[in-house]
Image: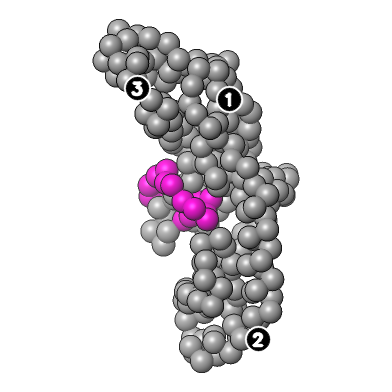
Amino acid sequence: MDPLSYQIKRTQRASKTRIVVTPEKIEVVAPLHVSEAMLHQFVNEQWHWIIQAVQKLKSRAEQLHSLAPKAYHDGAAIPYQGKTYSLSLTPTKLKRIRVEHSHVFTVHIPHTHLDTIGSEEIKSAVTRWMKANVKMTVEQMVLLHGPKHNLFPKSVSIKSQKSRWGSCGIHNDIAINWLLALAPLEILEYVVVHELCHIKEKNHSKHFWALVAQHLPNYRSAQLWLKQHGRTLMLGI
């Protein structure tokens, strides 16, 4: 990330100007009416804090270790829903790779390709399974929480995102980061509820958080978990 460059994002949701520093970019989020000159002045005033934030992110990144195994071989440890499960590779007469999960992750590999299918193909199969499974889980959570306050999204999608856990668009289309499949279920549930509540409250006002609390009274514990483990989670599998 170039510490001398930053992006400006104007949004109706913003009530005041703020700076967001992530490993990918520096972003100035501002209300629509704030002039560009005022934004540049704001950045200059906050420049010392920005440099410190960038350095802190770099330091954290050096200390992070991916949850993923180095190779997807028989016996490798696969992270899922806050736990790790052993990977079991087994031949099958099926023509395609199939993934199952119970107390282990079982990957059924066509016996005719047992010697040619490598780690990356197995990883891709496990990733596809997780994305499909988290989609079903999210839809179940929407059905559980949506009716309480008539919070029904226009659509639900699972995406690969580098810096966001979820989003709710202006038309109430909800997107959830598939990497939450690696987190405990209560963390995924918090993010789903968070985005559902944006259907009614498009900001992070006290009314928004009160609505979140009506669904999940202990939501702050999930926030803390994401703060402590989020960066490691973002490294993926």
Between the residue at mark 2 and the residue at mark 1, the CA separation in whole angstroms equals 47 Å
Q: Reply yes or no: does residue 166 show up in magenta.
A: yes
Q: Residue 121: x percent and y percent?
A: 37, 28
Residue hosting label 3: 117
Residue 130 magenta-highlighted: no
Residue 77 image label: 1
Q: Residue furthest front?
A: 115
> Crowding at label 1, few (<14), some or many (≥20) Cα neighbours within 10 Å?
many
Start-end of magenta stretch:
153-168
Residue 17 placement, left or right of 113: right
Q: Nearer the viewer, residue 157 or 164?
A: 164
* Discs 2/3, front: 3
Secondary-structure class at tag 3: loop
Q: Which mark is residue 45?
A: 2
Residue 169 image point, x, y percent: 42, 59
Q: Earlier in the sequence, mark 3 or mark 1?
A: 1
Front tag of 2 and 1: 1
Q: Earlier in the sequence, mark 2 or mark 1?
A: 2
Relative placement, left or right, of 113 versus 37 is left
- Sort mark 3 into few (<14), some (14-19) or many (20+) by Cα contacts within 10 Å: few
Q: Earlier in the sequence, mark 2 or mark 3?
A: 2
- The amino acid type, in three-letter code, at marker 3 is Ile
Residue 219, percent from left and from top: 69, 47
